Image (spheres, grey):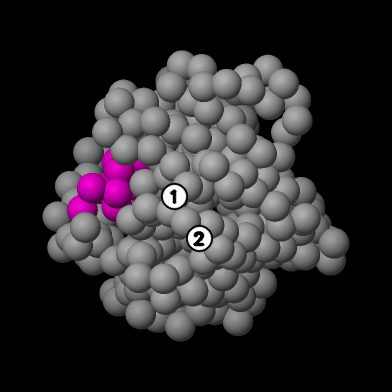
Amino acid sequence: MATILLTGGTGLVGRALSSALLEKKHNVIILTRSTKQMAISPQPKNGIQWVQWNVEAQTIDKDAVAKADYIIHLAGAGVADKRWTKKRKQEIVDSRVKSGALLVTALSEIENNVKAVITASAIGWYGADPVIPNPIPFLEDAPADTAFLGDTCRQWEQSIEPVTQLKKRVVKLRIGIVLSKDGGALKEFIKPLQFGVAAILGNGKQMISWIHIDDLVNMFMAAIENENMNGVYNAVAPKPVSNKELTLELARSRKKFFIPFYVPSFILKLLLGEMSIEILKSATVSSTKIQQAGFNFKFPDIKSALKNN
């Protein structure tokens, strides 16, 4: 049994991960900015303790850091929650970089027994496939893309890197599109199906590197338990699919009758602005390294993943 200090604990992945950690009898301490949450649950409840941190003020609960055996860092403003204005883009970057810097400072200044820091990153690190289909999926040693998300991921990962100088193990999971019945991208894909429409984005040929929420949670657990895991791993399933394949497979699993409808790229650009570049980008990302580390996927293909969602 270990004590896990968790940032981003109220998000889609954080909620699922907290439940899994509790099932394994770990103690979970969640860092929160919410004074409301603290008022509701100032003491450990149902295996979870809530403590405060303030990324802008660079303050953190020192006792929580001192108690922790592992830190899992998921915090960051939602990339797809709002249109990418200049202000929003800065919020996306700062929420990741400044929170990483706060953890580094805390670990360097507060006496602690933290064995490893496991941080989220994203496959936004990678650029677009040079050809579709791409016979050479992106590996972890590929350089960061120079576009907004690629540069954000670069800064995100760099912000936590100084922890290695403190002789602590660092694992960075570059997460693909997370498929979960509880929210996230899958919820958005399902919305048009409520009206009998299978909305294929652009030409539908762009490849989506995805992962089932259960596999992602298990990957974070593996990063805690497997001391040989170190550095960057792509958190994606072994079998990426095209947007068209994902959309039609989802439609077949949800509806007896549906009409495939291609949403033109220019419409997406009008609606989403710069974010549409990522929606239409094809990125075929390799899962080889994490599999070589001994990780086994429960849901390696899209059919099994959607059947379980």
Residue linked to disc 2:
107
Secondary element type, mark 2? helix
Secondary element type, mark 1? strand
Closest to the observer, 148 or 61: 61
Circles 1 and 2: CB distance less than 8 Å?
A: yes
Q: Residue at x 33, y 31 (%)?
A: 26
**Three-letter amino acid code of the residue under disc 1:** Ile
**Three-letter amino acid code of the residue under disc 2:** Leu
Please tell me whether residue 89 belongs to the stretch shown in magenta. Answer: no
User: Looking at the image, which residue sits at the far front?
Assistant: 111
x, y (%) of residue 216? 36, 44
Q: Residue at x 36, y 65 (%)?
A: 168
Residue 118 in sight: no
Above or below, 1 relative to 101: above
Closest to the observer, 55 or 246: 55
**In the image: residue 306, left or right of residue 243:** left
Q: Residue at x 61, y 44 (%)?
A: 61
- Please identify the quarter of the rendering in which residue 274 is found: bottom right
Q: How would you rate the neighbour count of disc 1 (Cα within 10 Å): few for under 14, some for 14-19, many for 20 or more?
A: many
**In the image: residue 120, left or right of residue 78:** left
Residue linked to disc 1:
71
Closest to the observer, 294 or 137: 294
Q: In the rendered structure, which segment of residues is drawn in magenta?
A: 214-226
- For marks 1 and 2, the one nearer the N-term is 1
- Please identify the quarter of the rendering in which residue 239 is found: bottom left
Q: How would you rate the neighbour count of disc 2 (Cα within 10 Å): few for under 14, some for 14-19, many for 20 or more?
A: some
Above or below, 17 relative to 140: above
